Amino acid sequence: MLTVIAILWVLIWVLVLVDLFRRDWSTGVKLLWAVAMLVFPVVGVIVYLIVRPPSSADMHGVRSGDTASEQVHDRHPV
């Protein structure tokens, strides 16, 4: 059971780091968040998920690189 929890936690942690490095923030801000998540893994990830502003893709439901969604969004702007 502990192994399953550890695997899920590592998966969440990796997904949060991927989200962090896809943001249009300065390198210093990204580095500070990454270090905080390495030093304080549980608290750092939870705080990041609460504090982070939504990206434009989060707000419009469009993923970057999803050409079908982008084409629909271009034809029907919101």
Image: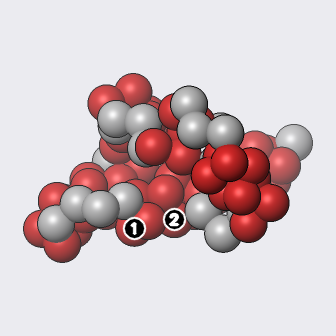
Q: Residue at x 37, y 59 (%)?
A: 23
Q: Position of residue 30 (x, y in %)?
A: 25, 63
Cα distance in 3D space between marks 2 and 1 = 5 Å
Tag on residue 21?
1
Along the viewing direction, whichever of 55 and 50 lies nearer the viewer: 55
Tag on residue 61?
none
Q: Are marks 2 and 1 in contact (CB under 8 Å)?
A: yes
The secondary element bearing badge 1 is classed as: helix
Rendered-image quadrant of the N terminus: top right
Q: Position of residue 11 (x, y in %)?
A: 68, 57
Q: Position of residue 4 (x, y in %)?
A: 83, 49
Task: Report whether residue 38 is seen.
Answer: no
Q: Residue at x 67, y 57 (%)?
A: 70
| Left or right: where 53 falls relative to 65 | left
| Left or right: where 55 falls relative to 1 | left
- Quarter where residue 39 is shown: bottom left
Q: Residue at x 62, y 52 (%)?
A: 74
The type of residue carrying mark 1 is Phe
Tag on residue 18?
2
The type of residue carrying mark 2 is Val
The secondary element bearing badge 2 is classed as: helix
Along the viewing direction, whichever of 53 and 2 lies nearer the viewer: 53
Label 2 packing within 10 angstroms: few (<14), some (14-19), many (20+) = few
Task: Report whether residue 33 is seen.
Answer: yes
- Quarter where residue 7 is shown: bottom right
